[in-house]
Image: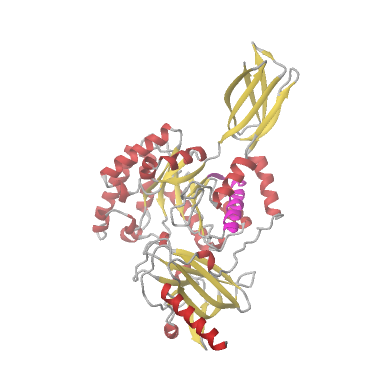
Amino acid sequence: MKKYLYLLIAICSIAACAQQPERRDLLQSDRLASLYSRDKAGEINFEEETLYLKTIEQPKFIYKLTTTLPIKKERVSKNAVVLLSFEGKTNESSEETGEAKLLIQLRQSDSFKENLDRTLNIGSVWKKYYIPFQATQNISKDDLAVVFQFGFQPQELALKNIKFEVFPQNTALEDLPKTEVTYIGMEMDAEWRKIAQARIEKLRKSDFNITVSKNGQPVEKANVQVELVRHSFPFGATMHAEELLKDKDQYERFKKVFGLTVLGNDLKIKRWSSKSRRKQTMKAIDMLRADNIAVKGHVLMWPGFQYNSDEVKANKNNPEKVKELVRKHMWNVLAATNGKISHWDVVNEAYTNKDFQNLMGGEEFLYEAFKITKNKAPQVTRFVNEYGIISKGGIDTQKQQWYYDYIKRVDEHVPGAVQGIGIQSHMGTDLTPPERVIEILSFYATLGKPISISEFTMDEQDPVVREQYTRDFMIAAFSHPNVAEFMFWGFQEDGRGKVDIYEKDGTIGEMGKAYFSLVDKDWKTTLSRKLTKKESIESRGFHGLYQYAVTVDGETKTGYFEVKNQKMNEIKIEL
């Protein structure tokens, strides 16, 4: 019987192998001992089958302390799943939690926005960590890499039993083990949330008084229905000109949800240099404006050569020619969109993109971008825009301080140049506690400018965490008096797993569930009142556009009114 059982298992195993390849560990563990730190601020050692990553002094940039795991290079297809696993513990920490931090990156291309990041807090005792990824694009064997970044505050962490496994193509991400993602303040009775909701009640609402009259006299026995149909606070999402024009179903959904958009790539110098695409972009902008949707411009200057046109890159050693080409682009796009753009991201991501600054010996050309915008389009609001300010747990205080000081430098060189602060908010799995989000917003609020949550995304795919953190982040942002807009960097799930207000099939995604539970429920004012005598209706509601329906003696009148951010809104409805 045992022989038969063993034979059956062997036959089944052979059959399974014939049908589906086994998962493969690509780590070349025999080469871990060769890893070393290229920066004296850190140390990398490999002893007794354990990898030690030590930060001696926190560098200016987290990525300055980096090592790439030795793996067998092979191509990974889009949607394939991979699993990084290891046992880890913290030996030394500068954090109050006693934990060390490790940023893990699955490199998919040479563009940082295409790569997938996870930031872990490593505990003080040995624990098994599972970090699954699903490729959002085809990854060439030359691009595939697993990168560890550890340029945080002084710390030391230890890793052992490291594996990097690639699974068969039909393996589902949810079938892989994973380390649970949590964040401080996620509990349902968290105190920060109660305080934030009280601020929202005070900041985002005003009193209103409705009087119904006929022939100048108050009426009685009237049924009054009132509903908020659009917030004055601008909630928005990224769209692209091509999908706006060609995907009518998606655009119809978008119009019902948002009153603000930013065209992701269409106004950037690379795309704008194509005349056919330029024509498509202008057609999309005109369509959006006809539908009363505000359009934000992104971006006039991106000071990294990789984000510029081929002509700019071909002159990367000629500063005057680069200036000429970039100026020409800015003049052209500002003239073409004059009166059609509400606000612009003038300079994008100047912290990590320093090609222009290095070529020209300073930031003066960046300041000039604000001068050009101020002169050519004085009616638009001018924003700076930067990533890594709120994300990664909100602990990168050096970058936060740099951005703060940079904004001040721009204003010193061009008085009044910066009118708004863009904070991108691309969230990995090291989810910044909402209280810390509010602290960072308050830090930038001391500059006295409106703040845009300009590019909110989430890499975390766990549906419960994805929905809850989106909701909590929105509550934190909406509760802050300086936050003037909230923009998702995406609208419909596009295969990258960044934003899912809607899924591809038109159903509501996890982030959409969070959004609608707030904007269409918790933050929506409705009123149904029956007047029995000559009286007015006093109430309080969110700022925005309202639709009303008043019925008297079987006849109904409908219309609109606004509740503005003022002490009292007197609404007079004449039948």
What residue is drawn where x is 44% and y is 85%? 33
What residue is drawn where x is 38% and y is 38%? 285
Question: Where, by quadrant of the figure, is residue 306 drawn?
Answer: bottom left
Q: Quadrant of the N terminus?
A: bottom right
In the displayed structure image, the side of residue 501 where residue 320 appears, left or right:
left
Q: Quadrant of the C terminus?
A: top right
Residue 358, image x and y in percent? 34, 61
Question: Where, by quadrant of the figure, is residue 39 drawn?
Answer: bottom left
Residue 557, image x and y in percent? 60, 19
390 magenta-colored? no
> Who is closer to the viewer here, 398 or 338?
338
Q: How is the image coloured?
A: secondary structure
> Who is closer to the viewer here, 495 or 13?
13
SS majority, magenta? helix
Question: Where, by quadrant of the figure, is residue 109 drawn?
Answer: bottom left
Residue 55, image x and y in percent? 52, 76
Q: Which residues are magenta?
A: 463-485
Q: How many marks?
A: 0
Residue 274, image x and y in percent? 27, 46
Q: Is residue 120 visible?
A: yes
In the displayed structure image, the side of residue 108 where residue 481 appears, left or right:
right
478 magenta-colored? yes
What residue is drawn where x is 63% and y is 78%? 125
Q: Residue furthest right?
A: 533
